[in-house]
Image (cartoon, rainbow, N blue to C red):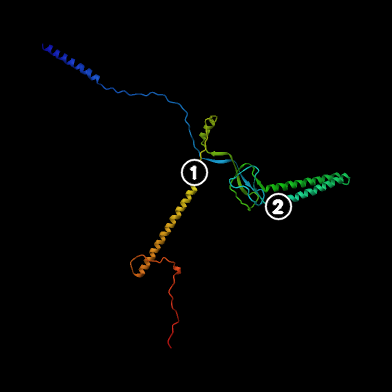
Amino acid sequence: MKKIKIQIILSVLLLIAIPACERHKEHAHVEYHKILVTSPLAKDVVSTQQYVCQIHSHRHIEVRAMESGYLEEIPVREGQLVKKGDTMFQVVPTLYQAKLDAEVAEAQLVEIELNNTEKLFQQKVVSQPEVALAKAKLAKAQAKVQLARAELNFANVKAPFDGIVDHQRHQHGSLIAEGDILTTLSDNDIMWVYFNQPEARYLEYIADKNRGDLKIELMLAKANKEAARGTELAVQRFQAEVCKNQSEKLILVQEIVEAENRINFLHGRFPQPVDRMSGDFVNLTNPTLNIGVPWEAA
């Protein structure tokens, strides 16, 4: 009987424990982690490389004087756009014009001699060699005329191409020598930009130079700051002058106090301000002093 009771008690305990276990399983907490699955997106990215560069005109020349002399009135101004063939400078052509006139007169004289020689040759007075000699003299005279005309043209300095006039080194009336720089002329229709590049980047550019997406842009960095640099410098100079004047004013005040202290010391009193007249010291009248020679009684 005792064994049967024990078995019954164990059976009842088992029946009670099994639902409790099932109830514990139902309340168990399970955490789930979300995993995002994606694929990379392929697209082009612009890579920018910045370099410091120097800008130069396509054509930039020095305009020099081809002859010596005094400059006449200059028809162009600094910064002016000139066309090809426009006169930029002109040297006083008095000497060259006189030389050209003399050579032209000499050529005319030789031409007259040639005509007379040809007439004499037709009359069989002179021989053929004399006619040839006269023609040679005429050719020589005409060459001298062309040389004098070229020297006269050298007095006029003309623009060899379209461009902008730079700073003028000489003004009207200046005495210039042959070869002196008058100004510079720049053609800015096409600009050349020079910059240094690492060898690796250059080789990469050579390898991909056939690509059409390569772009080169020019940026003028800090242009406004550079333009305002002169104004900023002027303001700094003005502030320095103000500080200088203030320091000189303090020095004058100190000298006045020291003078007052010396006056108070002479009067035997404590330091105190000394009253001063606000009028003009130059116009003050001094009292009359009576002077004379001492007289001794006889």
As drawn, the residue found furthest toward the left would be: 1
- The residue under label 2 is which amino acid type? Leu
Q: Position of residue 246 (x, y in %)?
A: 42, 57
Disc nearest the viewer among 2 and 1: 1
Depicted 254 relative to depicted 126: above or below: below
Q: Position of residue 289 (x, y in %)?
A: 43, 76
Label 2, secondary structure: give it: helix
Label 1, secondary structure: give it: helix
Q: Return the residue nearer the eye: 98 or 28.
A: 98
Compute the Cα span from label 2 to label 1. Answer: 51 Å
- The residue under label 1 is which amino acid type? Asn
Look at the image and tell me in which quarter the N terminus lies. Answer: top left
Look at the image and tell me in which quarter the C terminus lies. Answer: bottom left
Left or right: residue 17 versus residue 64 is left
The disc, 2 or 1, on the residue closer to the chain's N-terminal end is 2
Q: Return the residue nearer the eye: 88 or 169.
A: 88
As drawn, the residue found furthest toward the bottom would be: 298
Residue 292, quarter of picture: bottom left
Determine which of the numbered discs, if any, sits on residue 95 in the image.
Answer: 2
Q: Position of residue 70 (x, y in %)?
A: 65, 52
At 41% from the left and 60% from the top, the residue drawn is 251
The residue singled out by tag 1 in the image is 224
At 55% from the left and 41% from the top, the residue drawn is 55
At 40% from the left and 61% from the top, the residue drawn is 253
At 56% from the left and 41% from the top, the residue drawn is 56
Left or right: residue 174 versus residue 101 is left
Q: Position of residue 164 (x, y in %)?
A: 59, 43
- For label 2, count other residues whose C-alpha is less than 10 Å away and answer few (under 14), some (14-19) or many (20+): few
